[in-house]
Image: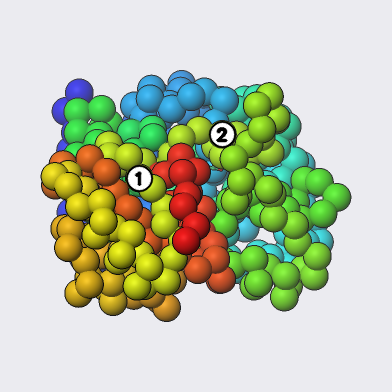
């Protein structure tokens, strides 16, 4: 299939490109587009064939459900059977923004979107291009990250081109994504609100609004054999470059000492900018030690750079788990397949 690239610098300067991309969505086609979290691979979320095409283009397991993206809270009742008080509080505080809510679904939501579950994940993104595409297409847009399943999520149009050229109808190039990690996913379908995936909206922020909020154990621990995943996406290996990644939880000096002892061809450090001076192996930085937002913004591009430089073994300096750091830690743990060394 031929993939069209639409360059959109702003919704005011390129309305024709936006209209063409929206028309493709409305017709049941696949369009990759920027959001404030990562690039999404969108399709009409109420069109079962279009949704199946997303799974095929990404090579995504069919039981890993998709997030529906809306551009107006008026779209909610068509998709969610119940809208609890907690959902209204969170919407008022964090929408539009990097927060996805899991709610009981209506029968209109195809099983292909929900992965056969009785719930649906919904987000109102804060990116003008994303919102304009949804508005013009007139549909809730199902959109997982626009990468091949298993590889690091895309935060630039070039990442989407690298993964999906020839597999989707169009890619909207709207520059790089601000947050750089996927949205926070919170389930409001059970007794206690539960974070299934950490992201740009932090657990601390959610607790301020709702009081009690649980964090699913799968956020920071591998799942037991046979355990049922609250968020099916959690059970798959994710965000991984081709190299083996080992997460090293250590002070700056101990990290440098540990890595330098293991200097060999193909060994790289994935580290903070302050680490570089003491390292004797090639290093790719993912932000400053005390800057979790910067780490979130840079992590996926850094993982892709390691592939481009043909890294074989990567020692990644473990981030703090405070605030947005929890999301960075969660993605790195999965990139490392939970291989972590504590010094
Ligand atoms: P991605 O589209 O790549 O950002 O992944 C979407 C994430 O949302 C995956 O981790 C899914 O498991 C999760 N998700 C989507 N729908 C549901 C749902 N109904 N219940 C629980 N988790 C969901
Ligand atoms: Mg993804």
Q: Is the residue marked 1 within 8 Å of ligand 2, measured from its CB?
A: no
Q: Residue at x 72, y 53 (%)?
A: 194
Q: Which numbered tag is attached to residue 99?
A: none
Residue at the spot 36% in from the left edge and 30% down from the top edge: 58
Is 306 situated left or right of 338 in this image? left
Question: In the image, is the residue at mark 2 within 8 Å of ligand 1 by its beta carbon?
Answer: no
Question: Looking at the image, is mark 2 or mark 1 earlier in the sequence?
Answer: 2
Q: Nearer the viewer, mark 2 or mark 1?
A: 1
* Relative to 277, residue 190 above or below: above
Against 180, is 1 above or below? above
How far from the left and from the top, in percent, is residue 123? 56, 53
Query: Are the residues flagged by discs 2 and 1 in contact, CB closer than 8 Å?
Result: no
Q: Where in the image, quadrant-wise, is ligand 1 located?
A: top right
Q: Label 2's element? A: helix
Horizontal side, residue 213 vs residue 332: left or right: right
Q: How many marks?
A: 2
Residue lying at the far front of the rendered structure:
261
Label 2 crowd bin: few (<14), some (14–19), many (20+), radius 10 Å: some
Whole-percent x, y for residue 312 in the image: 22, 40
Q: Is residue 294 visible?
A: no
Question: Is residue 159 or residue 79 the one in the foreground?
Answer: 159
Q: To which residue does mark 1 refer?
A: 245
- Which quadrant of the structure image shows residue 277? bottom left
**Where is mark 2, residue-wise?**
235
């Amino acid at each position: 299939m031929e993939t069209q690239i639409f360059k959109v610098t702003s919704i005011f300067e390129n309305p024709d490109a936006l209209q063409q991309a929206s028309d493709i969505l409305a017709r049941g086609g696949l369009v990759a587009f920027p959001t404030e979290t990562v690039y999404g691979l969108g399709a009409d979320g109420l069109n079962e064939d279009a949704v199946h095409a997303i799974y095929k283009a990404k090579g995504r397991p069919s039981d890993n459900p998709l997030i529906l993206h809306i551009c107006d809270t008026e779209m909610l009742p068509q998709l969610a059977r119940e809208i609890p008080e907690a959902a209204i509080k969170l919407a008022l505080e964090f929408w539009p923004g990097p927060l996805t809510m899991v709610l009981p679904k209506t029968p209109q939501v195809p099983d292909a979107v929900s992965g056969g579950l009785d719930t649906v994940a919904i987000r109102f993104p804060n990116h003008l291009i994303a919102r304009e595409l949804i508005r013009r297409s007139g549909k809730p847009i199902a959109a997982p990250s626009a990468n091949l399943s298993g590889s690091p999520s895309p935060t630039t149009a070039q990442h989407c081109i690298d993964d999906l050229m020839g597999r989707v109808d169009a890619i909207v190039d709207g520059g790089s994504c601000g947050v750089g990690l996927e949205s926070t996913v919170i389930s409001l379908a059970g007794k206690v609100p539960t974070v299934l995936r950490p992201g740009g909206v932090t657990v601390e922020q959610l607790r301020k609004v709702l009081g009690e909020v649980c964090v699913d154990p799968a956020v920071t621990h591998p799942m037991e054999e046979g355990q049922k995943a609250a968020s099916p996406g959690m059970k798959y290996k994710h965000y991984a470059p081709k190299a083996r990644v080992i997460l090293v939880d250590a002070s700056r000096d101990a990290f440098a000492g540990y890595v330098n002892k293991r200097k060999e061809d193909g060994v790289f450090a994935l580290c903070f900018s302050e680490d570089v001076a003491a390292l004797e192996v090639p290093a790719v930085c993912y932000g400053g030690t005390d800057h979790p937002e910067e780490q979130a913004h840079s992590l996926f591009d850094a993982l892709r750079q390691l592939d481009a430089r043909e890294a074989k073994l990567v020692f990644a300096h473990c981030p703090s788990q405070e605030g947005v750091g929890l999301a960075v830690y969660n993605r790195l743990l999965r990139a490392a397949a939970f291989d972590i060394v504590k010094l």
